Amino acid sequence: MKIILLGPPGAGKGTQAKLISEKYTIPHISTGDIFRKNISEKTTLGVKAKEYMDKGLLVPDELTIDLVKDRLSESDCKNGFLLDGFPRTVKQAEALEDFLRINNQKIDTALLIDVPGKLIFERMTGRRVCPACGASYHVKFNPPKIEGKCDACGSDIVQRKDDAEETVRDRITVYEKQTQPLVEYYNSKDQLFVVDGTQSIEEVFNTISNYMGSKK
Ligand code: ADP
Ligand code: AMP
């Protein structure tokens, strides 16, 4: 199963990706997570990516596309994958399509988690993440059992730098200009499934699971 998760920042892509990848045993590939790992390890890529991410801008296509191609070439992606946060531009989507076509493959579905702008802001500013294990929470909608501590590993959870209010505004604008055109891109190829992302985490997951089940 080859799935792309589309949606504005804060729509719930990472939250659903974790659930979907567990259910279907496919790797969850988040370009944002890969960049954050490189930043924490201070690699050359991390230093370059940080400049853009801190401002809420997209990391240039030249850096992002090759990274994803390399990741998709790894053996665990043979039977499928779930892309979270990629593609984010039409150029990235075309590069992915070309890459898969060379191997006679194509994606099964682009799942759009649809959430209106006014809800996104609250989702993003309330998001907290675990720097140690990557688990994600929300102060109101998905709080950890003990305030400020990760359920999975007990570390202190933190706010992502790019989830600060000023940067969130810029990220939403970037999404509307650069990523939203992908909705029509996949719709025109009959590969789009839209899920109402205003539902609870469980309801969104059930809707996606039912749809994936119906496609088999
Ligand atoms: P994305 O990966 O699309 O940027 P996340 O999965 O990190 O988004 O979700 C953003 C925030 O919203 C997180 O704090 C998450 O816990 C919360 N969240 C995710 N899905 C829902 C939902 N259906 N209802 C309420 N809050 C949600
Ligand atoms: P995310 O974790 O998906 O919210 O991504 C965090 C940030 O990483 C984004 O705001 C971008 O700066 C960068 N990023 C992640 N994925 C991509 C991508 N496909 N193209 C360009 N930049 C990306």
Image (cartoon, rainbow, N blue to C red):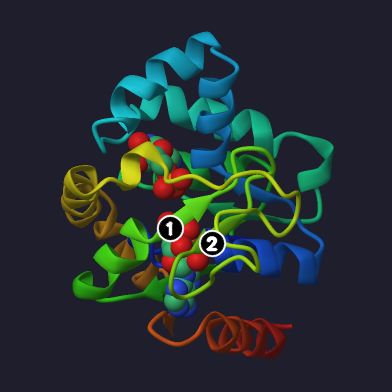
- The amino acid marked with disc number 2 is Tyr
Which residue is nearer to you in this view: 115 or 131?
131
Judging depth in this view, the residue of 93 and 147 nearest the camera is 147
Q: Quick one: label 2, few (<14), some, or many (20+) residues within 10 Å?
A: many
- Find disc 2 in the rendering and name its residue: 137
Q: Residue at 82% across / 44% down in the picture?
A: 76
Q: Is the distance from the Cβ of mark 2 to the nearest ligand 1 atom less than 8 Å?
A: yes
Q: Which residue: 19% across, 57% down?
A: 176
**Nearer to the camera, 196 or 131:** 131
Q: Answer yes or no: is residue 12 visible.
A: no
Q: In this view, does 114 lie to the left or right of 139?
A: left
State the SS at label 1. strand
Q: Earlier in the sequence, mark 2 or mark 1?
A: 1
Question: Can you give x and y, in whole percent of width and height, for residue 212 in the image?
Answer: 66, 81
Q: Residue furthest top?
A: 44
Check disc 1 and report the residue beneath it. Answer: 127
Queried on whether the Cβ of the residue with tag 1 lies below 8 angstroms from ligand 1, the answer reads: yes
**In the depicted structure, whether residue 108 falls above or below residue 153:** below
For the point 72% across and 62% down, the residue is 21
From where the camera sits, is residue 32 visible? yes
Using the rendered view, name the quadrant where residue 198 is placed: bottom left
Location of the N terminus by quadrant is bottom right
Which quarter of the figure is the C terminus placed in? Answer: bottom right
Whether residue 215 sits left or right of residue 121 in the image: it is right
Query: Circle 2 sits in a helix, a strand or a loop, which is it?
Result: strand
- What percent of the width, then of the height, locates residue 153? 76, 49
The quadrant holding residue 8 is bottom left
Residue 48 in the image: x percent, y percent?
A: 39, 15
Mark 2–mark 1 CB contact (< 8 Å): yes
Q: In this view, does 33 lie to the left or right of 173?
A: right
Q: Disc 1 residue type?
A: Arg
Give the total of numbered labels.
2
